[in-house]
Image (cartoon, grey):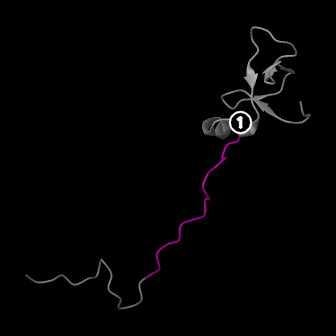
């Protein structure tokens, strides 16, 4: 197990306690295996929703402000000042 690598529960909650490695290579919580041991994951192995919980803002689109529409040039027809057609 690499030192300094964060481990997370399935829902994205960070786990900071002791860990142990199972014979199949999985990392579980607790120094030794017991009834309350749960499988732990690395960040890249989490689901998208779990990553959001682990790291708020993960995968969010850029929050650049939207451009305001340009002001019409003097005399330019717009939707509001367009002349109505006579029937």
Magenta span: helix, strand or loop, mainly?
loop
Tell me what residue is drawn at x 64 percent, y 36 percent.
47
* Residue at the limit of the structure toward the right, as seen here: 3
Q: Quadrant of residue 25?
A: top right
> Does the magenta segment cover residue 23?
no
* Residue at the limit of the structure toward the top, as seen here: 35
Q: Quadrant of residue 63?
A: bottom right
* Residue at the limit of the structure toward the left, as seen here: 87
Tell me if 66 is positioned left or right of 50 in this view. left
Boundaries of the magenta span: 55-71
Q: Secondary structure at mark 1?
A: helix
* Residue at the limit of the structure toward the front, as seen here: 24
Relative to 72, is 53 above or below?
above
Please name whichever residue, 2 or 52, is drawn nearer the observer in this view of the structure. 2
Tell me what residue is drawn at x 83 percent, y 16 percent.
30
Quarter placement of the N terminus? top right
Quarter placement of the C terminus? bottom left
Q: Quadrant of residue 11?
A: top right
Which percent across, then down, holds residue 38?
Answer: 74, 18
Tell me what residue is drawn at x 39 percent, y 91 percent.
74
Which percent across, then down, holds residue 39?
Answer: 74, 22
Crowd around label 1: few <14 · some 14–19 · many ≥20 (10 Å): few
Please name whichever residue, 76 or 26, is drawn nearer the observer in this view of the structure. 26
Please name whichever residue, 85 or 38, is drawn nearer the observer in this view of the structure. 38
Q: Which residue is mark 1?
A: 45
> Does the magenta segment cover residue 69?
yes
Tell me what residue is drawn at x 83 percent, y 18 percent.
23
Which percent across, then down, holds residue 54?
Answer: 70, 37
Which percent across, then down, holds residue 83?
Answer: 22, 84
Tell me if 68 is positioned left or right of 74 in this view. right
């Amino acid at each position: 197990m690499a030192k300094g690598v964060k481990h997370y529960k399935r829902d994205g909650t960070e786990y900071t306690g002791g860990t142990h490695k199972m014979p199949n290579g999985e990392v579980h919580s607790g120094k030794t295996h017991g009834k309350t041991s749960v499988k732990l994951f690395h960040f890249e192995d989490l689901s998208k929703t779990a990553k959001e919980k682990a790291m708020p803002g993960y995968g969010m689109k850029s929050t650049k402000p939207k451009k305001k529409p340009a002001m019409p040039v003097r005399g330019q027809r717009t939707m509001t000042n367009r002349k109505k057609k006579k029937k």
